[in-house]
Structures are given as structure tokens and as C-alpha cells.
Amino acid sequence: MKTLLVILDGLNYQVAYEAMGYLHGECAAGHGCLYSLECELPSLSRPLYECILTGIPPVESGVVHNDVVRLSHHRSIFHYARAAGLTTAAAAYHWVSELYNRAPFDAIRDRHTVEPQATIQYGHFYHADHYPDSHLFEDAESLRQRYQPDFLLIHPMNIDDAGHRFGLSSPQYRNAARTADGLLSRYLPAWLAEGYQVLVTADHGMNDDRSHGGILPEERQVPLFVFGDAFSQEDAAPLQTQLCGTICRLLGVEHDRPVCRELLK
């Protein structure tokens, strides 16, 4: 089944629970379900992109801080999908390109990627944290409509950017989450109508020091919304390290990663 993963960078679970009315409405209508999961450590972005996409914790992957600029040493969802002959795409921060396509990132060469032989075949990769989420979702929808990828990653940054500027308890941070919820309301109905399985999660949360990286609950607790007819909507306790294997199961591709079986029918 075609699958779409949305990583809302820096979104704390409690803020997602309180601010994302549209996603909750879809859940209340029986179209999805919200779970809480705890991110791996350190609660930093690049290590957790690698964790989500490969199922490997940072201390095992070696991507233990944001300045590890190299290709991943592990197979990701993109690798498993490509090995099965599926099409891959991403509208994401440039660190994703560095992990799975080419490092270091060269904006002129890599920002707009159309490379059928690459791990991420089609991509729009941005490198400014304030790059508007509205533009990023448009980039993603353009990729989806143009290339019909089997696996599409959508990764906006404005929630995290607001957290670093204003902190967890700020109206700016909460409103950035509301904005992302509103953007999803424009696209999710069409995705579901076209049979996509959709996961919406975060890499890490945020604290009132305008940062993250430690073990505070507000830094580690993140949401996982799931939508689509492949999900069970039953009680589950998903782990961040199970997202890779679970998505591979949805895609129907061979893999060797753990799966959260309770999430799936």
C-alpha cells in the first residue's frame, strides 16, 4: 500500500493533543487514532531522522548529534522500498538528503532532485528553518501528483523553529502546531480518498529553554497519528524504533526491522 509519513519537526505530544483540532476530528470520525510515543536519545533532529527512517537508535547508528554529516550506514525505508522496485520521494530538510542521497548537501545540485537511480528518487530539500510549512506541503503535493511515489516523506520545520525562538509554552509554538494542523486539513482527505496510509509524528519535542536534547518528558513525548484502512485503531504502545519496520510492512516490502503489530490489522 502507498504510504505517506509526515514528521512535524519538534512537535511535543501535549501540544499536539491540545492544538490539532482537525486531526482529532478525523480520529473522532473513526478515520484515525492518536498514540503517544517516546523518542530515542539524544532527543535531537538528525539522530532521530535516522532512527525513524532506519529503526536504529542513535547510539547504534553513530548519528549522535546534528553535525554528523555523512551518509547513513544503515538501510532506511527508502532503501527497502527501492530494493522492491518502489518509487520514493521526499519534501524534507536537507539533512535527509545528506543521510540517504549525497553528503555534504549542495543546494544548487541537490535542492531539487530528479534521479531515478537514487535512494530518494524525487525530492525538494530546503535548508532554512523558517522555510514556510505552506510551501513545503505544496512541494510535497507536487511530488505526489507528479511522480505518484509509493513512499513519500513530508517534513516541515516551522514548529521546531518557533520552539527555538519562543519556547514550549509560547503562543507562537502552539500556533505553529495549529498552522500545521490546518495545512493537513487541506491535503489529508485527498490522501485518504486515494488509498494512502498516513502516519503523522515528530522526531522530538521541545522545552521552555527553547531547546531539546535531554530526557525531560516534554522533550521526549511525541505524537503518532495514524490514518488509513490498514490500521487497527486498537490500543498500542508504539516505539520510535518500530516506525521503519511498520512502514515497510505497510509498503509490502522485505525488511529486517521491528514492527508494532498492534498498530496494524
Image (tube, grey):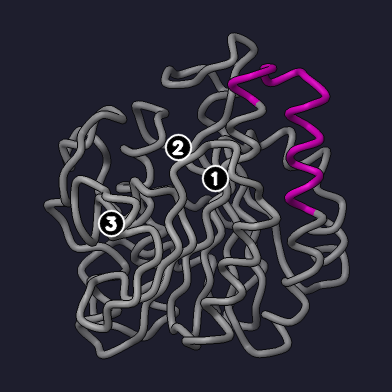
Specify the amino acid type for callout 2: Cys
Q: Position of residue 6 (x, y in %)?
A: 56, 59
Which SS does the magenta portion mostly show?
helix
Q: Which sits in the foreground, 102 or 213?
A: 102
Note whether residue 1 is visible: no
Q: Is residue 150 left or right of residue 100?
A: right
Label 2 residue SS: loop
Could you say which is closer to the camera, residue 213 or residue 147?
Answer: 147
Q: Of the residues shown, which amino acid type is indicated by label 1?
A: Ala
Report the residue marked by disc 2: 39
Residue type at tag 3: Thr
Mark 1, residue position:
202
Residue sitting at x 37%, y 64%? 259
Residue 217 x %, y %: 56, 23
Across and down, in percent, residue 222 comes to 58, 39
Real-space Cα separation, disc 1 to disc 2, in angstroms: 9 Å
Which of the image's four quarters has the C terminus? bottom right
Q: Position of residue 74 (x, y in %)?
A: 16, 56
Q: Nearer the viewer, mark 1 or mark 2?
A: 1
Contact between marks 1 and 2 (CB within 8 A): the answer is: yes
Q: To which residue does mark 3 refer? A: 54
**246, above or below 23, in the image:** below
Local crowd size for mark 3, using a 10 Å CA cut-off: few (<14), some (14–19), many (≥20): many
Query: Looking at the image, which is closer to me, 150 or 258?
Result: 150
